Amino acid sequence: SSLSVYTADKTWKAFKLPTRYVGEMIIDNNGYKWIMTPRPNLSGNGICVFDDNGTPLNDVDDRSILLNTQNSDLPTNMVRCLALMPNGEVWVGTDAGLVVFRNPSNAFSGNFKAERIIIEQGGVGGYLLGSEMVYYIAVDGSGRRWIGTNKGAWLIDRNGMDILKHYNTENSPLPSDDIFSIGIDENTGEVFFNTDKGLFSVKGNATKPQEKMSNLKIFPNPVRSDFDGEVAIEGLALDSRVKITDINGNIIFETISNGGRATWNCRTFAGVRPATGVYLVFAIDGKGEQKAMGKILFVK
């Protein structure tokens, strides 16, 4: 068997799948197992989806299906990576671009299709990432997608439609455009890229959101006159709205957090640096249920 389970009561169970070869596996919100099928002799088999119906020791109600170019609109059977999104979608990286399964719960419906994301750039429509080879998909603390390809690394907004950044050897210190895997430090937001010529990282601006907001961590603080970077505000809940005011309550900056972090470029709405003084930071989570505050001292 190509798949087995070891249960909590120390029992082993082997399953029957429609493929002999299995690779990376993810489990979606329905409990379905999405399994890559490696490519023996350079021919891919697509994706195997398996459901034990929550009864791993009883194979009577098991279901499985092999999704490929014939029944799912996959552009190729050569699948390189799988990723589960916070909204439950399954994103798939292939040798011929990126595809999305919007409703994994319909995997066994008989009419289950993969979707190519269409975006518009410069007035021209096309597939997101085109037909690039997609090696890896990672999700940061704010739900954005970092995608490693044969043409560098891409940051896609969590709506899955907007390209926020593209790093390659021409516009960054990346040693290679082949990004084989990506790792994200949820505590700092730093993003690591594994290439065929070594490891590279960038300072991301998204961290893991907090379930409960309490004390905000603001750094650097105080902000001295020779500092011209960004102030980070951490300890936030998902989609927190952050407002910065002067001591009289006048709002000088406002933003939405990326996961558990918000950043400020030390400029007011007018684009000028604040005067010396104490500034207040107010935060409220996306549901309007939790609040937190802090202070920033500016020395000009």
Image (tube, rainbow, N blue to C red):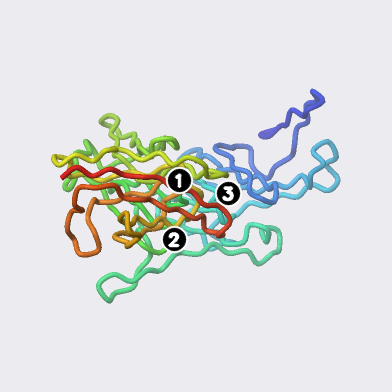
Q: Which residue is drawn at 23% across and 41% down?
A: 223
Residue occupying image coordinates x 17% and y 48%: 171
- Across and down, in percent, residue 225 comes to 15, 42
Q: Say what secondary structure mark 2 lies in.
A: loop
**Measured Cα–Cα span from mark 3 to mark 2:** 21 Å
Q: Mark 3 points at which residue?
A: 47
Q: Note whether 8 is above or below 126 in the view shown.
A: above
The secondary structure type at the circle numbered 3 is strand
- Mark 1 residue type: Gly
**Label 1 vs 2, first from the N-terminus:** 2
Res 260 label? 1
Q: Residue furthest bottom?
A: 123
Quickly name the residue at label 2.
Answer: 160
Q: Please tell me how crowded label 2 is: few (under 14), some (14-19), or many (20+) other residues with Cα within 10 Å.
A: some
User: Residue 4: which quarter of the image?
Assistant: top right
Looking at the image, is mark 1 or mark 2 nearer the viewer? Answer: 1
